[in-house]
């Protein structure tokens, strides 16, 4: 009987190690800014300076976070409407030229937050394989407008940020 208990204990330890190293159980860091706060994975780092600027039409707070897997940019706008931010983004993308392809919009509800999502593909020259693929999320929470840009490889992390983001 004691060997059975040891076997079960070993199985439990291996299981917990597998979960903790796979990212299922992970510690979080907190970003606490002027217009927003949110949680992000502990192994990610803030890379772009956090800044407040006038942006395209009005003041916004921007922050970039990065891991070895990708990059996520988060912007919170002081007063801009969702329609204004999305329209300005679309107009800017249309001026980028033939190397940029935009698909969407797609609509997705993430933890009660209604998001409009566009996918951006950037090609280099005549290549049929995109150099990069990014997703752009536009949404509002408690009256504040947000925009998030991320590499397609880390859209799950971006969606976790959307779940945790708190407007101020």
Image (spheres, rainbow, N blue to C red):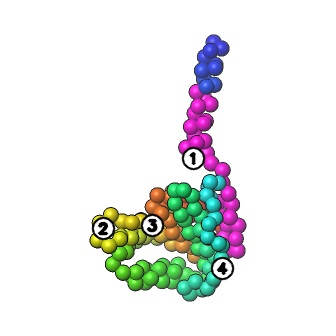
Cα–Cα span, label 1 and label 3: 22 Å
Which is closer to the viewer, label 2 or label 3?
A: 2
**Label 3: which secondary element:** strand
Q: Which residue is at the front of the view, 160 or 18?
A: 18
Image quadrant holding the N terminus, namely top right
Q: Earlier in the sequence, mark 1 or mark 2?
A: 1
Looking at the image, which residue sits at the far front?
Answer: 125
Earlier residue among tags 2 and 3: 2
- In the image, which residues are magenta? 11-39
- Left or right: 83 with respect to 33? left
**C-alpha separation, residue under disc 2 versus residue under disc 4:** 37 Å
Label 2 crowd bin: few (<14), some (14–19), many (20+), radius 10 Å: few
Question: Dot 4 surroundings within 10 Å: few (below 14), some, or many (20 or more)?
Answer: some
CA gap, disc 1 and disc 4: 32 Å
Label annotation for residue 127: 2
Query: Residue 39: which quarter of the image?
Result: bottom right
Q: Residues within 10 Å of mark 3 (few under 14, many from 20)?
A: some
Quarter of the C terminus within the rendering: bottom right
Secondary structure type for disc 4: strand
Asked if residue 120 can be seen in this view, the reply is: yes
Task: Please tell me which residue is depicted at 60% across the width and 16% down the height of the picture.
Answer: 4
Q: Would residue 33 be counted in the magenta stretch?
A: yes
What residue is at 50 percent from the left and 58 percent from the top? 154
What residue do we see at 61% from left, 36% from top? 16
State the residue position of label 4: 52
Name the image quarter holding residue 79: bottom right
Disc 1 crowd rating (10 Å Cα; few below 14, some 14-19, many 20+) is few
Q: Which mark is residue 134?
A: 3
Q: Which mark is residue 168?
A: none
């Amino acid at each position: 009987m004691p060997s059975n208990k040891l076997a079960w204990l070993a199985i439990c330890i291996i299981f917990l190690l597998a979960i903790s190293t796979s990212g299922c159980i992970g510690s979080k860091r907190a970003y606490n800014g002027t217009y927003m706060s949110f949680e992000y994975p502990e192994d990610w780092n803030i890379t772009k300076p956090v800044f407040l600027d006038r942006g395209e039409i009005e003041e916004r707070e921007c922050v970039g976070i990065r891991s070895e897997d990708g990059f996520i940019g988060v912007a919170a706008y002081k007063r801009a409407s969702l329609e204004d931010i999305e329209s300005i983004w679309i107009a800017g993308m249309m001026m980028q030229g033939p190397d940029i392809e935009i698909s969407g919009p797609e609509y997705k509800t993430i933890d009660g937050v209604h998001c409009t999502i566009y996918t951006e593909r950037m090609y280099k020259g005549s290549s049929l394989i995109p150099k990069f693929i990014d997703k752009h999320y536009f949404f509002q929470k408690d009256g504040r407008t947000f925009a998030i840009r991320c590499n397609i490889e880390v859209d799950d992390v971006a969606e976790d940020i959307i779940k945790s983001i708190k407007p101020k």
